[in-house]
Image: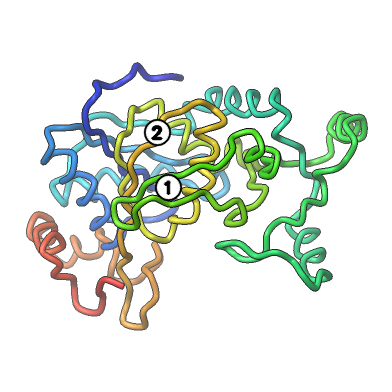
Amino acid sequence: MSHPPLPRHLVTRFAPSPTGRLHVGHGWSALQAFDLARGAGGRFLLRIEDTDVTRCRPAFTDGICEDLRWLGIDWDRLMIQSARLADYDAALGRLKAMGLAYPCFCSRGDIAREVAASLHAPHGADGPLYPGTCRHIAADERAARIARGEPHSWRLDMGAALARTGPLVWRDELAGDVPVDPMQLGDLILKGRDRPASYHLAVVVDDAAQGVTHVVRGRDVFASTHAHRTLQALLGLPTPLYRHHGLIVDAAGQRLAKRAAGLALADLRAQGRDGRVLADDLRAGRFPVGIALG
């Protein structure tokens, strides 16, 4: 289900996954994107990234909306990723037609064993990279295994992709111009065995469909932008300006998780906190006791 293009002015978005309740760090990130858009007379969009069908719950989507409204955040348009699966399939089909996507029949266990057996497994931002086991399987064998119903995901052949695009750069407001590094994520998954579209594929398709001009998000996904810039170039999609902000951490210096007790926005609301006051405190860099900007 495609959306009509938005007017050409500043557009930001907040794109949580409904796998739990929002915490203070989510609220701080959402406020930055919201304030940037509203301060420029632009649009702020809410996107529910619910393609992880094993973990996402509709109740958490309702909770996200409740939490944002409590902080005083409203949005101009709501997008639900699970309503857009045909768009992701179309993008994957284009990559297949270019010869840049291949089926991967490896399970997580298969990959872990192969990496463990290698003395020189390359590492990216998130640890050992996929070793490319299925990249060189012959086309007829691939087709036969798919026809037999063998479970598989689809991966991007990153080497072939960058050979097509040539050197790429993306811009972060804080880090400046960043050359794409193909070793950050390797042959990333485009469509999983049990997920109709990967985060990487869906996010670039949706940012383009929604006319997003500025992406404000946490530094924990900085490395993912190398993949996103590559996919944008391959699919002929525009590249937003990025701002990867610092993360809110707990007293031990660990970034907050959705299961963080007492720091969920719903918990603070239950304690009688005023959401608008909390929002103003977060804007001013005043965080609840026990957390700080890492």
Front: mark 1 or 2: 2
**Residue 153 picture quarter:** top right
Within-10-Å neighbours for mark 2: few <14, some 14–19, many 20+: many
Q: Is residue 181 left or right of residue 101?
A: left
Q: Residue furthest bottom?
A: 252
Q: Is residue 140 left or right of residue 212?
A: right
* Distance between the alpha carbons at the discs numbered 1 and 2: 15 Å
41 or 250, which is in the foreground?
A: 41
What residue is shown at x 81% (from left), y 59% (from top)?
A: 110
Tell me which amino acid carries mark 1: Ser
Determine the secondary structure under disc 2: helix
What residue is shown at x 65% (from left), y 24% (from top)?
A: 93
**Residue 266 picture quarter:** bottom left
What residue is shown at x 61% (from left), y 41% (from top)?
A: 195
Residue 207's label in the rendered image is: 2
Q: Position of residue 133 (x, y in %)?
A: 82, 51
Q: Position of residue 124 (x, y in %)?
A: 60, 62
Tell me which amino acid carries mark 2: Asp
What quarter of the picture does the C terminus occupy?
bottom left
Q: Is residue 107 left or right of residue 45?
A: right
**Residue 88 picture quarter:** top right
Residue 275's label in the rendered image is: none
259 or 77, which is in the foreground?
A: 77
Q: Residue furthest front?
A: 167
Residue to which mark 1 is pinned: 17
Q: Residue furthest top?
A: 4
Q: Position of residue 121 (x, y in %)?
A: 74, 66
Q: Position of residue 4 (x, y in %)?
A: 34, 16
Within-10-Å neighbours for mark 1: few <14, some 14–19, many 20+: many
